Amino acid sequence: MRIDPLSATLHALADPTRRALLARLALGDASVTELGAPLDMSLAAVSKHLKVLEGAGLVSRGRHMQWRPCHLEAAPLRDASEWLEQYRRFWDRSIDALADHLATIQATKKTKVKK
Amino acid sequence: MRIDPLSATLHALADPTRRALLARLALGDASVTELGAPLDMSLAAVSKHLKVLEGAGLVSRGRHMQWRPCHLEAAPLRDASEWLEQYRRFWDRSIDALADHLATIQATKKTKVKK
DNA sequence: TATATATTCAACCGAACGGTTGTCAACCGT
DNA sequence: ACGGTTGACAACCGTTCGGTTGAATATATA
């Protein structure tokens, strides 16, 4: 993996199929066949998606009998979440503005007090 | 844009150049030329990146003289953050597991108490 | 009108993506 | 040793991505 980890994580997450795989893994470890069962595509395709997730560190794999159980690894999700938090003030600001606006409307309805 | 908004947002964010553009916009609105100045690539390329961000709703644009100022729109970031929060328990759990592990080690050093 | 500046559009390129099929290896239970 | 299941790997295909260049479009200013 030569590109930066955050890009790898976000790219891995920017696909509904891969997010569905993660959602399934959040319920517990699973084999490739299990994961692919509900996914109207070949198992080879599922395997490729898993390799992308694995490359981003979002999935680890073991070996048990002839199965390669997949396990959710949340660390990159935490990192991505922390990166996003950096911008929280921007949407919080919007929420505050909306709250202020609503409060103003509410206040104006009852009295003529401004601001 | 026919694909789902979350995929669009994550795909837009999965590129260091576009994240750099957002970081710059977090400091305030800016023109394409301003945004492209530090970015060793053609302005047409910058314009394309901005179009991707705009398509994901992460950037809005105005018109002032011959400039098209770019403005950061945080709502999709909030949505992405909320999606990630769904998995917080997994990395929190890891932290708990680590804490437990460390506590166990600490305890074992002092006594022979198990578990 | 002409000219400079700011930005987009269109065509093109190589690389990566998301999927397929076919083949092959590893492991299981007779 | 055999047949069945699980999974990965390689080759291929059409599309998208990230970049280029050159021409086109707006908008201000002389």
Image (spheres, coloured by chain):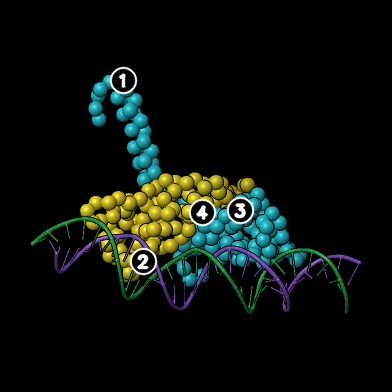
Chain colours: A yellow, B cyan, C green, D purple
The residue type indicated by label 2 comes to Ala
Give the foreground label among 2 and 4: 4
| Quadrant in the picture for residue D6 | bottom left
Residue at 41% x, 50% y is A57
Whether residue A47 is visible to the viewer of this picture, yes or no, is yes
Report helix, strand or loop for mark 2: helix
Q: Quadrant of residue B44?
A: bottom right
Asked if marks 3 and 2 fall on the same chain, the answer is no
Q: Quadrant of residue C22?
A: bottom left
Residue position marked by numbered label 2 in the rendering: A45
The total of numbered circles placed on residues is 4
Cα–Cα gap, marks 3 and 1: 50 Å
Three-letter code for the amino acid on which mark 4 is drawn: Arg
Write down the chain letter for disc 3: B
Q: Which residue is under mark 1?
A: B110
Q: Evaluate if marks 1 and 4 touch, with contact meaning CB atoms under 8 Å apart.
A: no
Image position of B58 with respect to A74: above or below: below
The dot on residue B84 is none
Of labels 2 and 4, earlier in sequence is 4
Q: Which mark is residue A2?
A: 4
User: For the residue labelled by badge 3, is the local secondary structure a helix, a strand or a loop?
Assistant: helix
Give neighbour class at mark 4: few <14, some 14-19, many 20+ (Cα, 10 Å). Answer: few
Q: Which residue is mark 3?
A: B20
- The earlier-in-sequence mark between 3 and 1 is 3
What amino acid is at disc 1? Lys
The vertical placement of B92 against A24, above or below, is: above
Residue B73 appears in the rendering: no
Q: What kind of residue is marked 3? A: Ala
Q: Chain of mark 2?
A: A
